[in-house]
C-alpha cells in the first residue's frame, strides 16, 4: 500500500466541504477570515508559517468524527491543534484544515477513589491541574506553557516538563484514550484500569505521534496525592560534574521526594537577570552553574528543608556546592522558579539562537554538556552556550546564542552544522535528538540519520496502516506529502 500526498483542492470542492462542515458545526465554527485564523497558521517561535482553508472547531467527539469523515471523503488534510504552543512546527498547516480541539474542554468525570480524571482533549493543562487540586489531588504534568497548552496536545507530543523525575512524561500519566481515527471511526479506549493485559498497548501508539495517526479527543488521566510540603533550593556549582554528584546524593537521601533537579549555566542566569526586570540574583556571588532543586511530599509538615540542610550542608563541606539558599516562603519559591521558566523567553533578546532538545543517560549528562560545549566553541569561537534544563532526566536544552556583534543570519546559517555536531555527540552517548518537544517539521529530516532504521520502518508501516490516504498531519514526523518547506 502506498501513501499519497494530499492533492491540492480546487476552490469549488473546498467550498462544498466547508459548507457541509458549517451546516453541521454552525458557521461560527468554520472560520476562514484571514485575520481570525492567522494565529493558527504559525508556530510559537515564528519559524514556520503555513496556510489553511479554514480553522474548524468541532464541539464534541462525534463532530470531530464527522469532520474527519468529510475531509477523508474530499481528500483534505487535517492538522489537529490544541494550544498551538508546540516548538517543532508540528501544528502548522500546509493546506487542508486546522482542526482545533479548543471547544472539547469538559472534564467529564473525576473519580477520587480511583485517582483518575476523564478530560477532553481541549482542556487547558492549568485547568486540569486546578480540577485535580480542588479534589485534593495532583495532576503533576507541569510546563511553562501550561496556561495555554491543552491536554490533547500534551499527550500527542508526550510532553515532559519539570516533574518528570518523579511522575514521568505525559505518556505515563494517561491510562486510556478516546481517539478519532483517519477513517472517522471513534476508538473508545477510555479505560481507567491500572492493569489491562488484553493485547497491544494501543494508547501508546497515539501518544507522541503528533497528530499523524489519530485525533485524541479525551483521556483518562492519572491523579496523585496532593502536595502538602515542599522545599526548594538554589545552589551555586563549579561544574556540571558537581551537579551530577549532588543529584546522586539527593536522590539517595530523598528518593521519590526529589521531584525536580534543574540546571543552568552562569550565562543563562545572567541573561534572565539582564532582561527580566523583576528577577533578583538568588546568591551573592557568581558561579559556573546553578541547580534549582525541589523536594515535595504529600505529608503535612514533612521535614524536607531538613534533608536539604543535611545533604547540601555536607556537599558544601565537601566542596561540591559553593553556595546555596533555601526558599523560605512561597513567594521566594516562585521567584526561583521564575528564573528557570523565563529562560526560553529571554534568550531571544540575545540575538539568534539555535536550539537542541536532547536526552542522554543521566550518568553521562555532565560529560555531554562538557563535550558539546567544547565542540561548539571550537566550531565558532564566541558562540555562547546556554545548556540548561531537566538535568535529573538527562534532558538538556542545548541552546546556542550568537556571538556578540555577529550578524544574526550568518549565525543561523550554521544551524545544520551545529545540529550535526550536537546530535552526533548525542548518538555516540546513546541519547535522543528529541527529548520532549517531538519531531514535527523541525527534526523530520534529521530523524532518518539518528533513528534505528528498523524502528523508522515500523513507524512508516504504522502510518500506512492507520492513515493510508495520509490525511492526518501529512509531512510531519515522517517525510511524506508535498508542498512542505524543508525542515530546518
Ligand atoms: P499544539 O502545539 O497545538 O500541537 C502539538 C502537536 O500535537 C502538533 O503536531 C499537533 O498536530 C498535535 N496535536 C495537538 N492536539 C492534538 C490532539 N488532540 N490529537 C492529536 N494530535 C494533536 N514542552 C515540553 O515537553 N516540556 C516543556 O518544558 C515545555 N516548555 C515550553 C515552554 C514554552 C514557553 C513553550 C511555548 C512551549 C513549551 N513546550 C514544552 C512545548 C509545548 O508547550 C508542548 O509541546 C505542549 O505539549 C503542546 O501542547 P499544545 O496543546 O500547545 O499542542
Image: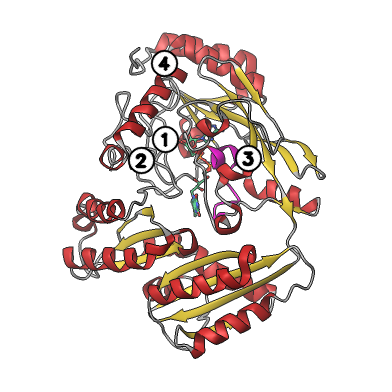
* Residue 149 seen anywhere in this rendered image of the structure: no
- The residue that disc 2 covers is 48
Q: Pick whichever of labels 2 and 4 is earlier in the sequence.
A: 2
- The residue that disc 3 covers is 174
Q: Which residues are magenta?
A: 143-155
- The residue that disc 1 covers is 92
- The residue that disc 4 covers is 468
- The mark closer to the camera, 1 or 4, is 4
Above or below residue 319? Residue 145 is above
- The mark closer to the camera, 2 or 3, is 3
- Majority SS type along the magenta span: loop
Q: Is residue 50 magenta?
A: no
Looking at the picture, how far across and down is residue 232, in whole percent? 61, 73
In the rendered image, which quarter contains the C terminus? Answer: top left
Q: How dense is the environment of label 2, judged by Cα within 10 Å: few (below 14), some, or many (20 and up)? A: many
Residue in front for this viewpoint, 126 or 292: 292
Amino acid at each position: 500500500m502506498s501513501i499519497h500526498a494530499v492533492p491540492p483542492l480546487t476552490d469549488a470542492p473546498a467550498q462544498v466541504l466547508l459548507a457541509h462542515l458549517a451546516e453541521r458545526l454552525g458557521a461560527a465554527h468554520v472560520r476562514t477570515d484571514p485575520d481570525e485564523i492567522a494565529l493558527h497558521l504559525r508556530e510559537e517561535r515564528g519559524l514556520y508559517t503555513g496556510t489553511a482553508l479554514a480553522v474548524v472547531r468541532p464541539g464534541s467527539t462525534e463532530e470531530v468524527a464527522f469532520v474527519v469523515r468529510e475531509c477523508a471523503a474530499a481528500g483534505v488534510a487535517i492538522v489537529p491543534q490544541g494550544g498551538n504552543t508546540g516548538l517543532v512546527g508540528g501544528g502548522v498547516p500546509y493546506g487542508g484544515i486546522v482542526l482545533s480541539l479548543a471547544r472539547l474542554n469538559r472534564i467529564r468525570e473525576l473519580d477520587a477513589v480511583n485517582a483518575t480524571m476523564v478530560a477532553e482533549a481541549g482542556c487547558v493543562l492549568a485547568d486540569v491541574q486546578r480540577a485535580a487540586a480542588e479534589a485534593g489531588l495532583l495532576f503533576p504534568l507541569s510546563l511553562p506553557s501550561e496556561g495555554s497548552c491543552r491536554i490533547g496536545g500534551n499527550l500527542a507530543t508526550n510532553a515532559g516538563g519539570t516533574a518528570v523525575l518523579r511522575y514521568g512524561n505525559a505518556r505515563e500519566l494517561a491510562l486510556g484514550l478516546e481517539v478519532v481515527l483517519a477513517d472517522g471511526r471513534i476508538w473508545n479506549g477510555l479505560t481507567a484500569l491500572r492493569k489491562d493485559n488484553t493485547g497491544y498497548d494501543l494508547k501508546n501508539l497515539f501518544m507522541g505521534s503528533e497528530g499523524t495517526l489519530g485525533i485524541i479527543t479525551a483521556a483518562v488521566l492519572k491523579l496523585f496525592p496532593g502536595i502538602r510540603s515542599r522545599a526548594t533550593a538554589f545552589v551555586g556549582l563549579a561544574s556540571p560534574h558537581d551537579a551530577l554528584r549532588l543529584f546522586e546524593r539527593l536522590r539517595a537521601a530523598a528518593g521519590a521526594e526529589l521531584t525536580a533537579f534543574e540546571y543552568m549555566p552562569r550565562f543563562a542566569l545572567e541573561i534572565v537577570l539582564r532582561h527580566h526586570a523583576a528577577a533578583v540574583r538568588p546568591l551573592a556571588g557568581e558561579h559556573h552553574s546553578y541547580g534549582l532543586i525541589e523536594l515535595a511530599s504529600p505529608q503535612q509538615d514533612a521535614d524536607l528543608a531538613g534533608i536539604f540542610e543535611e545533604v547540601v550542608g555536607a556537599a558544601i563541606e565537601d566542596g561540591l556546592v559553593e553556595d546555596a539558599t533555601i526558599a523560605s516562603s512561597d513567594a521566594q519559591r516562585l521567584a526561583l522558579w521564575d528564573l528557570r521558566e523565563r529562560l526560553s523567553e529571554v534568550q531571544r533578546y540575545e540575538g539568534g539562537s539555535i536550539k537542541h532538545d536532547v536526552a542522554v543517560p543521566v550518568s553521562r549528562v555532565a560529560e555531554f554538556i562538557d563535550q558539546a560545549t567544547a565542540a561548539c566553541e571550537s566550531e565558532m569561537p564566541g558562540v555562547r552556550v546556554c545548556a540548561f534544563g531537566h538535568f535529573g532526566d538527562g534532558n538538556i536544552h542545548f541552546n546556542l546564542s550568537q556571538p556578540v556583534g555577529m550578524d544574526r543570519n550568518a549565525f543561523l546559517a550554521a544551524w545544520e552544522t551545529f545540529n550535526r555536531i550536537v546530535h552526533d555527540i548525542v548518538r555516540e552517548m546513546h541519547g535522543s535528538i528529541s527529548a520532549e518537544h517531538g519531531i514535527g517539521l523541525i527534526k523530520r529530516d534529521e530523524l532518518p540519520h539518528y533513528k534505528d532504521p528498523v524502528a523508522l520502518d515500523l513507524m512508516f508501516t504504522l502510518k500506512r496502516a492507520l492513515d493510508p490516504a495520509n490525511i492526518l498531519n501529512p509531512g510531519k514526523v515522517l517525510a511524506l506529502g508535498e508542498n512542505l518547506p524543508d525542515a530546518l
